[in-house]
Each structure stands twice: as C-alpha cells, then as structure tokens.
C-alpha cells in the first residue's frame, strides 16, 4: 500500500525508474532501497505467513527481515540494497524468512 510518507528526503539525487508490483516509481539513484521506498510512501513490504500481518522496515541493518522484497526472483532485504535503474521489486505476500538470501 502506498500512503503519504512521514519521511523526507535529505538530498535530491538523480532519479531512476524502478517498478514496485509492476507500478513505476522514480527513486533516488544509489539510495538505500528501504529508505527510498519509505520516503515514497511504501510502508508494507511483506506480510507474515501465519497471521498475514503487514510488515515494514524496522532495524534498517539487516537483522529483522521485515523489509524482505523479491528482486529478480530472489527474496532480499531492502535495507541492504541500493536503488539502481530497472529494479523490479515485488512485495512478498507471505515471506518465508529462512529462505531469504542476502
Ligand atoms: S529493516 Fe530489518 S532487515 Fe531490513
């Protein structure tokens, strides 16, 4: 779900185009992917497999796995990636954390 963000961008980097669940987004090139998505108003990155609870970035340092998204067919932690042109990001409906690849 995309909502109005409470986060603000500190610098204005050149934008590159990515897709999120097939929708185009322009994000700052080279920015932390989780932070860039939060600034863009994306707060739900995945849902838990048991209770279907929405999850979003929490630790921002690769520990909690709440920022898992699928990129190029692989579950990845968004907080450990940088934005680059052409990323095809898919939110995981029921991410299985043990299968995540970093
Ligand atoms: S925000 Fe915790 S692993 Fe990415």
Image (cartoon, rainbow, N blue to C red):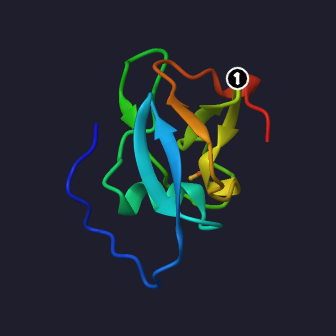
The N terminus: image quadrant: top left
Tell me residue 88's x, y (percent).
Answer: 58, 35
On screen, residue 36 versus residue 60, left or right, reads left
Judged from this view, the residue extending furthest toward the bottom is 11
Judged from this view, the residue extending furthest toward the top is 50
Using the image, determine if residue 27 lies above or below residue 22. below
On screen, residue 90 versus residue 26, left or right, reads right
- Which residue sits at x=60%, y=66%? 29
Which SS class for mark 1? Answer: loop
Using the image, determine if residue 52 lies above or below residue 34. above
Picture quadrant where residue 70 is located: top right
Using the image, determine if residue 69 lies above or below residue 30. above
Q: Which residue is mark 1?
A: 73
Disc 1 residue lies near ligand 1 with CB under 8 A? no
Judged from this view, the residue extending furthest toward the left is 4
> What is the number of callouts on the image?
1
The C terminus: image quadrant: top right
Q: Nearer the viewer, residue 79 or 2?
A: 2
- Which residue sits at x=35%, y=47%? 43
Tell me residue 85's x, y (percent).
Answer: 63, 52
Tell me residue 12's x, y (percent).
Answer: 46, 81
- Which residue sits at x=73%, y=30%? 100
- Which residue sits at x=44%, y=29%? 21
Q: Nearer the viewer, residue 62 or 43?
A: 43
Q: Nearer the viewer, residue 57 or 15?
A: 15
Few, some or many C-alpha atoms within 10 Å of disc 1 (few <14, some 14-19, many ≥20)?
A: few
């Amino acid at each position: 779900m995309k909502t109005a963000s409470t986060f603000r961008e500190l610098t204005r980097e050149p934008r590159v185009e990515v897709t999120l669940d097939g929708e185009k987004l322009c994000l700052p090139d080279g920015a932390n992917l989780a932070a860039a998505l939060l600034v863009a108003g994306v707060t739900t990155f995945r849902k838990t497999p048991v209770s279907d609870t929405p999850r979003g970035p929490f630790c921002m340092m690769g520990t909690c796995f709440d920022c898992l998204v699928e990129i190029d067919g692989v579950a990845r932690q968004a907080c450990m990636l940088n934005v680059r042109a052409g990323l095809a990001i898919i939110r995981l409906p029921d991410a299985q954390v043990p299968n995540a690849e970093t």
